[in-house]
Image (cartoon, rainbow, N blue to C red):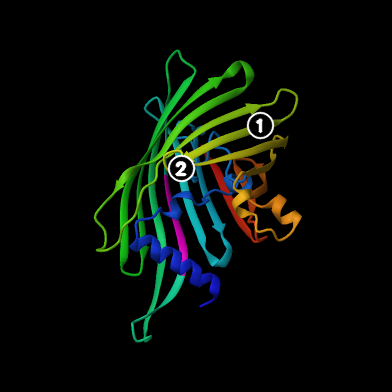
Amino acid sequence: MTMNRLIIFSSVFNLLIAETEFPGLDAFTSSARLAMGGAGYLNYSSVSSKYNPSITGNGRHFSSSFIRYQTGITSQSAGISFPWKNGVSSMAVRHISYGTFEGYDTDLQSTGAYRAGDNFLSVTHSIKMNRMPVKIGVLGQYFSSMLQDYTINAILFSLGGELLLENINGSIGLSIHNVGTTLNGSQDAKGVIVPKIVLSGSKQLSHLPLTLFIDLVTKSKFEETEMYFGGQFKLKSNLQLRLGTSTRKIDHNTEQDLLRSILGATGFGIGYAFGSTEIHYGTFIMGTGSLIHGLEIGVMIE
C-alpha cells in the first residue's frame, strides 16, 4: 500500500469510527462544476451535489459524469430532469469509490481485500412562484458511507430560493444544505452532519457572452467561510469555456513555487454541444500540482 493510499485509508477509517464530517458530501461529482473550481451554485447540473435546489434545467435532460481524483479515487454519477406538476423535478444517483484495500488482523495476517465508498440517491423539485420573480426548491437525499464492516446511513435535505433580477440579467440565491440525521448503521460507526449555508449570485454581462458566478459558503456555525468565483464564456452557440477559483487556494498553498500557489484550487474546462448532445471536460488543480479530471455527457430527451 502506497503512502498516499495509506493516508486515504486512515482518513476514511477515522471518518467512520469517530464523530467527524463526511468528505463525500463535499466532493465534486460534476465536471462542469469542477471546471469552475466549485463555483456556480446557481448553474444547474443534475449530477452535481453542489447547487441551489431551486435551479432547474429546461425540458427533459439526462446527464452522466465521471470524475477521477488523485490516487485512484473516482466518482460516477447519472441524473435526469423532467417537467412535473407545474415545476421541474430531477433524480440522481452518485457513487464515490475510495479504492480497494488489503485488510489485516492484529497478528498482521491478511484478511482479504475490501472496498470503501459512498452512495447517494437524491430527488429534487423546484417551482416558480406565480406573479413573483422567485423560484423555490427542495432536495431530499439518501446517503450511505461504507468501509469494510462499518456503514453509516443518513437522510439529508437541502432548501433553496432564487430571486430573478430580470432587468439586469442576474439572480441572487440563498440555500441551506445537509440538514438531516444519521440512521442506524454499524456498531461504533459514527458521523457528524455539518449543515452549510450558501449565498450565491449570478450575472450575465450585457456586452460579453459571459456569465459570472460568486458563492459564499459558510458552515460549522459560521466558523468556516469560503468564497468561490467562476465564469462561463460562450464563444459560439455550441462552445463554452469555464474558469473558476476560490479562497480554498489558501489551504492548498504548499509553498512549493509561485505558479502552484497561484493556480491552486483553480479549475478550467470546455464544453461543446452538437445537436441534442453536449460534452463537458473539466480539470481542477490541487495546491500540490496534482490534477482532478472530469468528463460529463448530457442529452436532451425529446
Camera-nearest residue between 187 and 219: 219
Residue designated by label 1: 211
Give the residue type that dot 2 points to: Ile
* Vertical order, 144 against 155 (above or below): below
Q: In the image, residue 213 lies at what x, y percent?
A: 61, 34
Where residue 78 appears, as percent x and y from the top left, is: 47, 50
Identify residue type, mark 1. Answer: Thr
Q: Which of 278 and 109 is in front in this view?
A: 109
On the image, the x and y values in percent for residue 299 come to 55, 43
First reached walking from the N terminus: tag 1 or tag 2: 2
Q: Residue at x 57, y 60 (%)?
A: 68
What residue sits right under mark 2 in the picture? 80
Outermost top residue? 131
Measured from the top left, where is residue 31 in percent x and y?
A: 58, 49
Figure disc tally: 2
Task: Say which residue appears at 44% left-offset and 50% top-offset.
Answer: 25
Q: In this view, does 157 lie to the left or right of 165?
A: left
- Disc 2 secondary structure class: strand
Q: Distance between the residues labelled 1 and 2?
A: 24 Å
Task: Answer left or right for 147 relative to 285.
Answer: left
Identified at 31% across, 61% down, the residue is: 151
Is the residue under label 2 in contact with that under label 1 (CB below 8 Å)? no
Judge the density around disc 1: few (<14), some (14-19), many (≥20) Cα neighbours within 10 Å: many
First to last magenta residue range: 92-99
> Residue at image x 69%, y 26%?
205
